Amino acid sequence: MATQDGGRTLQTTQTSLEVVETLRAMDGARVTELAEEMGVAPSTMHAHLTTLREAEYVVKDGDVYHLSLKFLALGDYVGNRREAYRIADSYTEQLAGETECRAVFVVEENGRGVYLHTYSGKHAVWKYSTIGKRFHLHQTASGKALLSQLPEFRVREIAEKWGLPSRTDNTINDLEALLDELAEIRERGIAFNEEEQLDGVKAVGVPVQGADGQVVGAFSVASPANRVDEERFRTELPNILLGVANEFELEISLS
């Protein structure tokens, strides 16, 4: 199978990767369950699972297959592949402490946002980790902060590939309106999320750049809407974010 850039893909590899994703989504499954879910023959599914098990990426508990702990090492490597990613961890924790909000550090990959670091503050919106979770950039403060640093043609490519689906009534789902807001974000250096990803949740985000001027990622903090007044939302939280972002950019420029 040919790709857009003229390369060639292998169907067997694609299927094995789909097995991994499906096992994760199903939280473990039997051969027949996986085969039915993916629409392949049980014998084919058994061959893929046997291969993954031999390579220690899958383990078997009775007759149920699960992803193995080997993925932990891969995840740790990927999350810390760049020095800036490692440095961002402590600054994300600092943000959670200073704002008492849920703080995150995210990056863009293949047109979507990815959570790399998350910390819960005193008034965090949710306590569970979302590390590794992917999301639509236009729905969040951090995502819009990232989009604001991309050229317009790239934003249009992302919108064409992933669409602009709504999560709430406030989500921006019109491309021209999004481009207008990104221009404003680019000018002021701050992105706001007014209940655009979750009803009852507001967030503020800022992009951060490396020494080369290229965007590295974005920090953001989120709070229940009823816990943040207009002054804190528009001034106090942005000032804290900008201060931490400046410290982060200084450190990575010197590292």
Image (cartoon, rainbow, N blue to C red):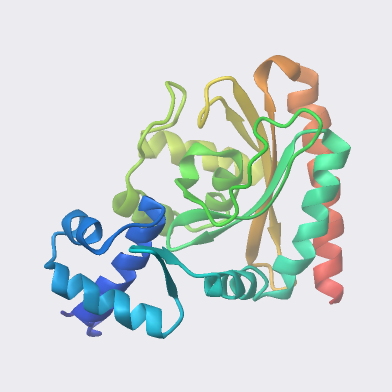
Give the left or right position of residue 207, taking residue 62 as reference: right
Quadrant of res 126: top right
Looking at the image, which is closer to me, 248 or 56?
Answer: 56
Does any portion of residue 245 appear in the rendered image? no
The location of residue 234, given as percent across then percent down, is 74, 26
Q: Residue at x 66, y 19 (%)?
A: 225
Q: Residue at x 37, y 66 (%)?
A: 20
Looking at the image, which is closer to me, 70 or 5?
Answer: 70
Q: Residue at x 25, y 59 (%)?
A: 34
Looking at the image, which is closer to me, 65 or 197?
Answer: 65
The location of residue 32, given as percent across then percent down, is 20, 60
Residue farthest to the front, as pictured? 62
Quadrant of res 116: bottom right
The location of residue 140, given as percent across then percent down, is 55, 39
Give the left or right position of residue 145, taking residue 122 as reference: left
The location of residue 50, given as percent across then percent down, is 31, 79
